[in-house]
Amino acid sequence: MITSRESLRTLGDIIGVTRHLDGATFALESGAALRLTFLLPGIIRVRFMSPDGKDRSDWSYAIEDSRFEGEEVFVEEDQQSIEIIAMSGVRVVALREGCLLSVFDEAGQLVVEDQQPPFFDPLNGFIETTKRRESDELYFGFGEKAKSSLQGSKSHMMWNTDTYAYAPGTDPIYQSIPFFIALREGLSYGIFFDNTYRCLFDMGHTSEEYYSFAALGGELNYYVFTGGRERSPRNILRDYTLLTGRCPLPPLWALGYQQSRWSYCPEARVRELARQFREKYIPVDVLYLDIDYMDEFRVFTWNQTHFPNPKLLIDDLKADGFRLVVIIDPGIKVDEKYFVYRDGRDEGHFCRTSEGEEFQGQVWPGTCAFPDFTNPSAREWFGNLYEQHLDAGVSGFWNDMNEPSVFAPGDTQSDIFDLPEKTFPLSVRHDGDGHAGDHARYHNVYGMQMARTTYEAIRRLRSDQRPFVLTRSGSAGIQRYAAVWTGDNVSTWEHLALSIPMLCNLSVSGVPFVGTDIGGFAGEPSGELFARWLQAAALTPFCRAHSEIGTSDQEPWSYGEEFEGINRATIELRYQFLPYLYSLFHEHEQTGVPVMRPLWFDYPHDRRTYSVDDQFLVGSDLLVAPVISEGAVTRSVYLPSGSQWRDWYTGLLYEGGTEIGANAPIDRLPLFVRAGAALFRQPVVQHTGQMRFAPLAITAISSGSLSTSTFYEDDGEGFDYKAGSFSLSQIQHRTGSLSFNRSAGLYSSRKIEFVEFLGVESAPREVSFNNQLISDIAFNEGTRRLLVPLPENGDSWVLTYTS
Ligand code: GLC
């Protein structure tokens, strides 16, 4: 990559050792230094400081909390090596010659080791490290990658890029997260390269025997996650998100279905859209306004002709259970008469060129200036501009074009997208929160700092409101501020298939709130493609249809009556599972596990899961196997080994470790549930505002062994949950018996009206609730479902049946 191998130098041998309570510092021959820190059991930081001794300030946008006490270590030295052993048993061995590092886990097994000494290029700041690999070691993560299987493509660039209608395989695209999980024979480890410059990961591409990661500047500063005793992906993500933060519990409404399109304008169109949803009884929570709501694309303005009274519109929508989200781009139109531009310029909030001039570039509004979101005062200024939108009742914000994307000068709108690297010149200056640097250094964090600006502004201006921010660009830690969608995809079956590995890789990069433009942004889907895409997205964490201006309508009813019915049922399915989905976001906030998961995440010991990228898990209990090929009405499904599974529709039991054929007529999303699971569901509601008054149901999946499930509830908005206003329910279940215990805390929980047992083979002889017989039950042999309406119930009860 962009440096010549001839000019590379090693950092040299270790010539001095300084011991610390939590690690050691090595002096290297080249003048560089290596600080090894054992932050927590299983998290080791490896930080090489440059030979020239320049800028050794320790500064990162990715790390949320670096105040770890550190783990106590012993250091042992001999002629050849230095060994640092932590209390947990995790060890690093450093060879004096070449400063080659090996990391071992608690059980003494090798986790990862250097294949060559680290290199640097004194001419251009390039740095690189190379690790040995076994040819069957696989790597997942890297943020947003438009690749159907990361195993096929083995090199990944980190450089946020606006890539309209990206072809599968395009690299890089909008988001870069220099973190991966390595997996081999059931054991995993993770590495996070905390470097914001353009980075390249060569994961066995040049040679099967090693992989490397390199950057065009900054420090060789990375973290190794050893994954605890289990060496599990779950432990790695827990630790990675301890460092880079987790996604705070979103407002409940943001988990509802969302309808967007570039061209919901004027106001009458928006009102009509809202009316159609309610009239057709298609549940929805959120409508979006794209750039056309503004006055010639000036952010924080409204087009007075098309939206004469935004507050009235939003109030009316709210009365009918809708939330409105509006787009805010970073480009500020250069216009003397425009208050945002004038204030930004006068107060010095815009990015400057290396000559000190205001940097200007072309985006939708024409010539624009761009706030320096790496400057705290620019963040505060821009953040305060959201006040008027909040006053008008806007519920959430969509930050786009924040790679940052700039049209090349002279380009017309039709060919602006053909230049993959269009962005600021690399010499543009940024404040870097007091660590001034150029765009080469801060490019990759620009989008995340914009999302942060938005998130922090809502927290500051509306302390009782959970922010909802959607961003196109991001980098490590973006999960703290925003949900993420995969940008300008295309209405093709290939893109639908791509959406699954894309969202799974984002999820295991620490970002749980993810989704795609349902139906595809560019192009026009057939009714079948839209219906299948909606099914595939029905249980993804973020669920929004969006399409490009000038394409045919892409609403759930745009494809005729038959598809309207199918699409309604798909969205209803999402709403029925919302209590479960919401609880998974709580689980993420507590433990760092993603909501949507590749199969290997929960089943790392089942090697057959490693290559499955047309199915995914939602939490541990749901396995979704969408149809992603045109005309297909069946598909094969792999059920991972270690659990038993039941078909959601028939209740039939399958052993794990088997591949089965699933029926998938056009109105069916193949769905499987883990035997033993018990999950919260609810009847169909038209929007999340109705949930408070809707009863809950428990669906329990029959299994011979005892399982325990935990469910979280709160009122879906605000921060009272942090002060105890929530409830946790524990369900213990095995075939024939279910016990329920709820600790309601300060929160008054929803009533549980039904229990549904799935997988019951014959009509029960007796059903009792707290030892009282119940007769009013419904049993359906065809779907193996037993439905039990519950009598008045409290926080603790037992339900049993005998067959
Ligand atoms: C970008 C976004 C797209 C949006 C359009 C207009 O292409 O990715 O979602 O609709 O800009 O704002």
Image (cartoon, grey):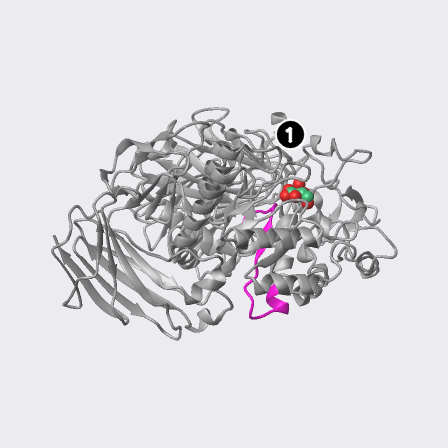
Instruction: Look at the image and tell me whether residue 63 can be seen.
Output: no
* Residue corresponding to mark 1: 2
Measuring 43% from the left and 26% from the top, which residue is drawn there?
A: 209
462 in the magenta segment: yes
Residue 748, x across and y down, in percent:
38, 73
- Drawn side of residue 434 relative to residue 224, left or right: right
The residue stretch that appears in magenta: 457-477
409 w.r.t. 53: above or below = above
Task: Name the residue nearer the viewer: 42 or 801.
Answer: 801
Measuring 70% from the left and 33% from the top, which residue is drawn there?
A: 417
Q: Residue furthest bottom?
A: 746
Residue 36, x across and y down, in percent:
47, 49
Residue 180, x across and y down, in percent:
46, 41
Give the quadrant of the N terminus: top right
- Drawn side of residue 282 relative to residue 425, left or right: left
Measuring 43% from the left and 50% from the top, which residue is drawn there?
A: 572
Q: Quadrant of residue 681?
A: bottom left
Please tell me in which quarter of the rendered image ligand 1 is found: top right
324 w.r.t. 213: above or below = below
Count of numbered labels shown in the rendering: 1
- Drawn side of residue 696 relative to residue 302, left or right: left
Task: Name the residue nearer the viewer: 560 or 249.
Answer: 560
Residue 227, x across and y down, in percent:
36, 47
Label 1 CB less than 8 angstroms from ligand 1: no
Give, as a three-letter code, the residue at label 1: Ile
Q: Mark 1, residues whose alpha carbon is within 10 Å: few (<14), some, or many (≥20)?
A: few
Label 1 sits on a secondary structure element that is loop
Task: Name the residue nearer the viewer: 204 or 511.
Answer: 511
Query: Is most of the magenta stretch helix, strand or loop?
Result: loop
569 in the magenta segment: no
